[in-house]
Amino acid sequence: MPHVASRNMSYREPVIKRMESDGSWSELDTYDVTLSDLKEYKFVETRLFDVEAMFAVVTRPRREILTISRRGGKLSPSVDVRICFAFKSMTFKTATNLEVEIQPVELTLISDLKHRKPIECDNLVASSPFIQFNLADSQLAKPMTVTIPVPPNPNKSRRPLTALSDRDGINGKGTSRPVSALSFTRELNVNEDLLYLLILLPGEGWTVSHDIHLIQSKTSDSVSIELNKPFDNRFLVIRTRGCVRYREAERIGSHIDQATRERTVQIMLRQRSDDPQRVILHCVSIAKAERYQRKLKEEGYDRGPPASNEIILHEGEKIKLGFRGNIKETSNKDGGETELVFNTHIATTRQFAVDIVDRFSQKSLDTYKGFCQLFVRGMVPRRLSKEEEKTKASLPKGQQKVEMVEGDILLCEMLITLPKPEPEAPKPIVNRAPILFKAEDVLDNDYLRHLSTVIGDEWRTLAQHLGIRRMRIQAILRNNVTMENDAVIYEMLATWAKRMPRSVNKVELLCRSLATAGRADLAEEVRDKQSEKHLENMKASRDAYLKKAFIKIAQRLPIVSEWRRLGKGLGLRSDVINRIDDKDAGVREKVTRCLNMWLDKTGDKANIILLLGVLRKCHWTQIACKCYNFD
């Protein structure tokens, strides 16, 4: 099987794993192999009798087999030659194999851990590698010694408390004892260093060993431990300041162990300069961030936000993508969740296409904006409901009642911007609905257009007094961006006239607003125009009323048969009556001609009351009453 593990990793090696029927993974005996036709690639092989299974290539700490002869001696693994296993002669009756597994702990990891966890790991000075060994023969005839490198404290040159002897007043015996075995009956000196041997016990985690001696070397930065009985647990030695106690040291060991499985990465999101809707997302280690950024720029992905802050991930951890704002993913056709799997040796990347959600939103911005969100699964707090709080009787009163449940944890948000299209040319003004006015009103379309030409710069103030909102004024300006100022003022007046109920006296309201806006001259002009219009309406109403009366009178038989008497009653001369008789053939036409001539003769003084009085003088009282009460 091929693999992508780096050849430069001296402390790790690839291994093939197989998934068993119960879902667990088991390691297979794995060997490196080189194929003559594919020398540039890396392969591993294993021998199987059953290949119907799922296989994967992973890396693990390198395991070395060292052979211990009967004469004993000192053995060092190739991963770290500073680590030494010393055996005395005749410790074993026959040659025995020693399997060693080393995981280095770099100084950069310690400094990074202290930076990320200043409270928990501030007193940590240095750490040895993680060591695990297994002897084929666990029966030791003589004690064995394991020498482990532990970097010194760079800020002090004194020896740690593990080297204190009886003259220091710690031990009543003449032999040196480890600090991990000392009781804290006296106050610890914060200026002294402490060494702790931590062992990973199943089900208990990292625990300080109290019964194993730690011997500090006088000439080198190493610590030796003497074992009468080997153990196959992982262990390490940490150096701390003198104020660290057992529990704190155990927590520090857990943090170091966890940090070896964590990777510090950055998220990089870039958009193509020629097509911003094409996006690429990279999850890279801090050391490779600049190189990837240059590579993306060469490929045309030179737009996008800066790289994210440092993020802690684990190998194989799934990263889920989400989107918020006015941006959505369009390349995911099935609608499922978009996920990435982080791996140090395989490029964790994703290319996708995005588009806007609503092109009418974010009008105040120059571009459309949204965010690409990255989540991982983890434990998040959830507030308990009142019913659940009742069941949690063990919780103290007043404490915020929450429980930890599995959920999405937000890692970071990356800004995505899409350019807006060029603004469209203003559309031509469509024919708007006509404005309906009362017949007696002076405010019609013609007069509003006249006012729009004489109002001038006071139109904004007038619009405010007329109760037109600022948003509507802005809409009017947008609709008439290419028009003259008169068209803007006319649409403002038309908008106001449309929204006014028919029962409202528009003329009086407009006059008051004009006067308040500083145009009292126009207010007076509108009032004069309205008075003239009122007189015209009254005259038209009077004439219409008289015309109806004329029709009723011309239909009455007594009047038709004696139309001459009606003419004389109306004050017409005899020669005028004779001309009417000669000119009109019909009798009803003659009656109508007499009434019209009376109307022309009387002028503005003519009204229905005066006409009815003439009828009563001619003794047509009943007809006069009917004419007065007609519908």
Image (tube, rainbow, N blue to C red):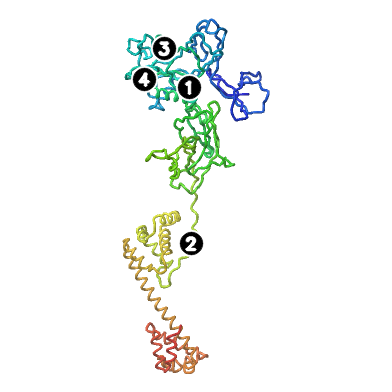
Measure the C-alpha gap from mark 3 to mark 2.
Answer: 98 Å
Circle 1 is placed at which residue position?
200
Measure the C-alpha gap from mark 1 to mark 4.
Answer: 22 Å
Callout 2 amino acid: Arg
Specify which label sits upstream in the sequence, 1 or 4: 1
> Which quarter of the figure is the N terminus placed in?
top right
| Rendered view: 582 above or below 276 | below
Q: Quadrant of residue 541?
A: bottom left
Question: How packed is label 1: few (under 14 Cα within 10 Å), some, or many (20 or more)?
Answer: many
Residue 244 coordinates in the image, percent (x, y): 37, 22
Specify which label sits upstream in the sequence, 4 or 3: 3
Secondary structure of the residue carrying numbered label 1: strand
Point 41% across, 12% down: residue: 215
Specify which label sits upstream in the sequence, 1 or 3: 1
Circle 4 is placed at which residue position?
241
| Rendered view: 331 above or below 483 | above
Question: How packed is label 4: few (under 14 Cα within 10 Å), some, or many (20 or more)?
Answer: many
Callout 4 amino acid: Arg
Q: Which mark is residue 432?
A: 2
Foreground label between 4 and 3? 3
Measure the C-alpha gap from mark 1 to mark 2.
Answer: 84 Å
Callout 1 amino acid: Leu
Measure the C-alpha gap from mark 1 to mark 3.
Answer: 21 Å
Q: Foreground residue, 275 or 395?
A: 395
Measure the C-alpha gap from mark 4 to mark 3.
Answer: 17 Å
Question: How packed is label 3: few (under 14 Cα within 10 Å), some, or many (20 or more)?
Answer: some
Residue 580 coordinates in the image, percent (x, y): 47, 90
Secondary structure of the residue carrying numbered label 4: strand
Q: Foreground residue, 59 or 353?
A: 59
Secondary structure of the residue carrying numbered label 2: loop
Q: Which mark is residue 215?
A: 3
